[in-house]
Amino acid sequence: MSSFKGFLAILIWTVIVAFGATEIGVGAHHSDPVWALGTAIAFLIWLVSSVAMFFGVARDAPFKWES
């Protein structure tokens, strides 16, 4: 059940980040190198924080065998 909560937390976080990216118009500035670099860094931070969030919520439950 904790894995489900972890995935749900990541889904909510992803929706928030996607909404923010569309609101600031990331897609309209994809040819600008500064925007492209900033977007890449922001998405990398989003990815690392998503993984950290999953393991923070799910703890070690996804790695335990069902008994």
Image (tube, rainbow, N blue to C red):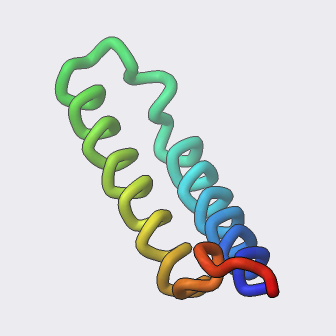
Q: Is residue 29 above or below residue 19?
A: above
Residue at x 59%, y 74% (from the top left corner): 63
Q: Nearer the viewer, residue 9 or 15?
A: 9
Which residue is most to the top?
Answer: 31
Q: Position of residue 13 (x, y in %)?
A: 60, 67
Split into 4 quadrants, where in the image is the N terminus?
A: bottom right
Whole-percent x, y for residue 8 in the image: 74, 72
Residue 35 sits above or below residue 31 on the image: below
Residue shown at 46%/64% (left/top)? Answer: 51
Which of the pair 47/29 is nearer the observer?
Answer: 47
Q: Position of residue 10 (x, y in %)?
A: 62, 66
- Determine which quarter of the picture holds residue 34: top left
For the C terminus, the quadrant is bottom right
The residue located at (67%, 58%) in the rendering is 15
Say above or below: 54 vs 15: below
The percent coordinates of residue 37 (x first, y second) are 22, 31
* Location of residue 40 (image quadrant): top left
Residue furthest front in the image: 67
Q: Using the rendered view, name the quadrant where residue 29 is placed.
A: top left
Q: Is residue 48 left or right of residue 56?
A: left
